């Protein structure tokens, strides 16, 4: 048998808890069964795991939990296709597979001392959350934290407990939320995230903006950030493409000559501008 | 390293000896096509052919390959992964295909460990069969491929009815030592007939910057004929895209990987309906840019060996060389 680890064979994990964030988003907290694999996993904020449902297939999902909270891994998964539909039907105690951690990561070290502005849309808040909570767990190492988030409606806002109760209570941490269309339960801002961002107009000085959401939202947000004075080195995003192997061999997830699974998913705007428009 | 001169009929001694200790894979004729097959009877081996229709990538990166088996019992999943690869000899590989394995090595034998490919590669002795003519649709000389490639363990170069054999590696030497052939002091160059291997218009990677050619109208023009049958990617010795899927059910089954094609309309289809390459011209662009721009920028060589299989098999006559020329020209006219 091979001496080195076989990256195409998943590690086994058990679902420890499931939180229903919205009608179609669930956060799965899982624990790797094998103690050594669990200790060695050590992901960095922004990395992803290839989640397996045996008999159905795999999907690359960003790890939404911070590595500073070591005992578990969290994946926040939206029900959009065949695999995620089955995942959403699974219970606590059931088994999944995990390969990873894969991909590059947010430059959490290089951005120390800066003000962090997170701009998320819908499920896009999930990858950002790993860095948000990492920064919160290392609070003194970062400047002000500003979270700007929006979803289709109040019902579709993910991570409500953190958004409304936990994060606003953290030192020098501000949360601004918007929804696309008005709804009964919501008294806050109504409007799309890019316009909301432009209204808020965060100060680019000594700041880093990190954004994730539907491709169209990312494109508008990147334009808006540049419009309000952010330099392309100050803007970071995390992208998503269809993936299969997750290890840079199956040829599927490239944007130009970069494979999102190994050269991404995290890209600065400066790097993104060198890539062709095919995502 | 040593060389030998082997009389034509003595090659059977060679085959017989190999078969005794290892698996022998060589070209056979099946229903009018030439394919690499495991040899049980050495009479099946053909020596008079251009090339196999399915490239030898299939012997290292099979069309379909089991990755592991799984079994789910009361929420406990067990994975069984018993790879074991016999030592084998592949005889009759052309120099273009030998080079294709070097190009595939940059994908499968670098970065993350791919033991499925790697162990097959390690357990295989490659024997090149020298080319004395250019294949009907081949354009290998434009890629400056070299005969008597040192990537092959052994090269059999046909000289009239006989063979001039050179050994390039210890693996090769250990195999040949099993048979007591007469050593030759001749020099390969003096014996190789100057084969007509085509014109020397050299094919190089696309020099233009990506932003000069990516949005060019030329892609629409050259992709018009394509019907998306995917044959080019299957017969191409350097195409390596694959899919992974589970065969079975939630209780038990196996995960496999199998060839896939970037030319397929759903190749980049994501759940939730977003498809970055849902137009045919985007996929044709991806294939050509991958082979002649992205891969060479990363690895220093174009991902094409000039075997001509795509030209042979395309049902609508898409010509990758012609298309490449048009792209480079369009880039110059920007």
Image (spheres, rainbow, N blue to C red):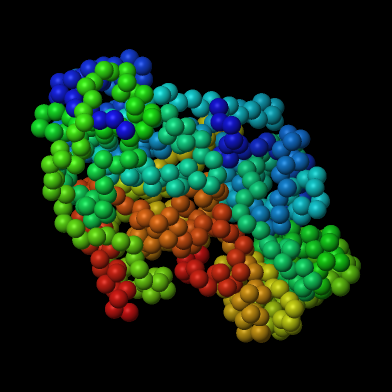
Q: Nearer the viewer, residue A85 or A11?
A: A11
Residue extending farthest to the top is B20
Horizontal side of residue B53 vs B65, given as left or right: left
Q: Nearer the viewer, residue A183 or B165?
A: B165
Horizontal side of residue B120 vs A270, given as left or right: left
At x 66%, y 85%, the residue is A228
Image spot of residue B120 (x, y percent): 43, 32
Q: Which image quadrant: the N terminus of chain B?
A: top left
Horizontal side of residue B112 vs A155, given as left or right: left
At x 59%, y 62%, the residue is A239
At x 16%, y 49%, the residue is B197
Q: Which image quadrant: the C terminus of chain B?
A: bottom left
Quadrant of residue B330 within the rendered picture: bottom left
Quadrant of residue B242 within the rendered picture: top left
From this viewpoint, is residue B86 visible? yes
Height in image: A197 above or below A38?
A: below
Height in image: B142 above or below A16?
A: below
Height in image: A119 above or below A20?
A: below
Height in image: A261 above or below B84?
A: below
Image spot of residue B51 (x, y percent): 22, 39
At x 34%, y 65%, the residue is B206
Q: Nearer the viewer, residue B4 or B70?
A: B4
Image spot of residue B68 (x, y percent): 54, 31
From this viewpoint, is residue A125 visible? no
């Amino acid at each position: 048998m091979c001496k080195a680890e076989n990256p195409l064979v998943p590690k086994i994990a058990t679902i420890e808890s499931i939180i229903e964030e919205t009608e179609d988003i669930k956060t799965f907290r899982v624990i790797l069964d094998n103690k050594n694999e669990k200790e060695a996993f050590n992901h960095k904020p922004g990395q992803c795991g290839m989640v397996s449902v045996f008999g159905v297939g795999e999907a690359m999902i960003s790890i939404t939990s911070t590595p500073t909270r070591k005992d578990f891994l969290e994946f926040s998964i939206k029900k959009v296709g065949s695999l995620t539909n089955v995942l959403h039907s699974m219970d606590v105690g059931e088994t999944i597979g995990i390969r990873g951690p894969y991909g590059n990561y947010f430059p959490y070290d290089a951005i120390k001392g800066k003000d962090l502005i997170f701009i998320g849309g819908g499920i896009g808040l999930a990858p950002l959350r790993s860095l948000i909570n990492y920064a919160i767990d290392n609070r003194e190492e970062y400047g002000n934290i500003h979270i700007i988030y929006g979803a289709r409606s109040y019902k579709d806002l993910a991570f409500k407990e953190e958004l409304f109760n936990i994060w606003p209570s953290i030192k020098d941490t501000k949360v601004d939320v918007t929804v696309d269309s008005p709804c009964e339960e919501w008294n806050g801002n109504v409007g799309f995230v890019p316009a909301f961002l432009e209204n808020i107009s965060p100060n680019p000085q000594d700041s880093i903006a990190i954004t994730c959401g539907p491709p169209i939202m990312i494109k508008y947000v990147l334009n808006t950030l540049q419009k309000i004075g952010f330099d392309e080195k100050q803007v970071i995003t995390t992208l998503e493409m269809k993936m299969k192997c997750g290890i840079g061999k199956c040829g599927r997830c490239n944007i130009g000559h970069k494979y999102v699974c190994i050269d991404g998913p995290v890209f600065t705007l400066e790097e993104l501008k060198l890539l062709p428009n095919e995502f | 390293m040593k060389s030998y001169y082997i009389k034509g009929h003595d090659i059977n001694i060679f085959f017989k000896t190999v078969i005794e200790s290892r698996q022998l894979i060589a070209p056979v004729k099946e229903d009018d096509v030439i394919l690499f097959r495991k040899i049980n009877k050495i009479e099946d081996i053909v020596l008079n052919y251009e090339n196999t229709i399915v490239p030898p990538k299939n012997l290292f990166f099979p069309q379909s390959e089991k990755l592991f088996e799984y079994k789910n019992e009361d929420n406990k999943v067990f994975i069984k992964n018993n790879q074991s690869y016999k030592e084998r000899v592949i005889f009759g590989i052309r120099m273009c295909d030998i080079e294709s394995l070097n190009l595939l090595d940059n994908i499968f034998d670098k970065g993350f460990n791919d033991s499925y490919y790697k162990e097959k590669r390690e357990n295989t002795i490659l024997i090149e069969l020298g080319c004395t003519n250019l294949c009907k649709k081949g354009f290998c000389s434009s890629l400056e491929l070299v005969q008597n490639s040192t990537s092959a363990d052994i090269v059999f170069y046909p000289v009239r009815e006989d063979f001039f054999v050179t050994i390039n590696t210890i693996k090769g030497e250990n195999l040949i030592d099993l048979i007591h052939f007469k050593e030759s002091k001749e020099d390969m160059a003096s014996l190789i007939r100057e084969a007509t291997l085509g014109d020397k218009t050299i094919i190089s990677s696309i020099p233009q910057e990506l932003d000069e050619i990516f949005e060019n109208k030329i892609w629409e023009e050259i992709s018009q004929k394509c019907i998306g049958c995917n044959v080019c990617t299957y017969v191409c010795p350097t195409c390596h895209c694959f899919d992974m899927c589970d065969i079975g059910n939630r209780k038990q089954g196996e995960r496999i990987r199998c060839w896939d094609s970037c030319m397929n309309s759903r190749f980049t289809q994501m759940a939730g309906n977003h498809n970055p390459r849902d137009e045919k011209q985007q996929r044709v662009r991806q294939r050509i840019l991958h082979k002649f721009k992205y891969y060479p920028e990363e690895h220093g060589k174009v991902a094409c060996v000039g075997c001509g299989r795509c030209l042979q098999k395309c049902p609508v006559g898409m010509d990758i060389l012609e298309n490449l020329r048009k792209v480079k020209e369009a880039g110059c006219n920007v």
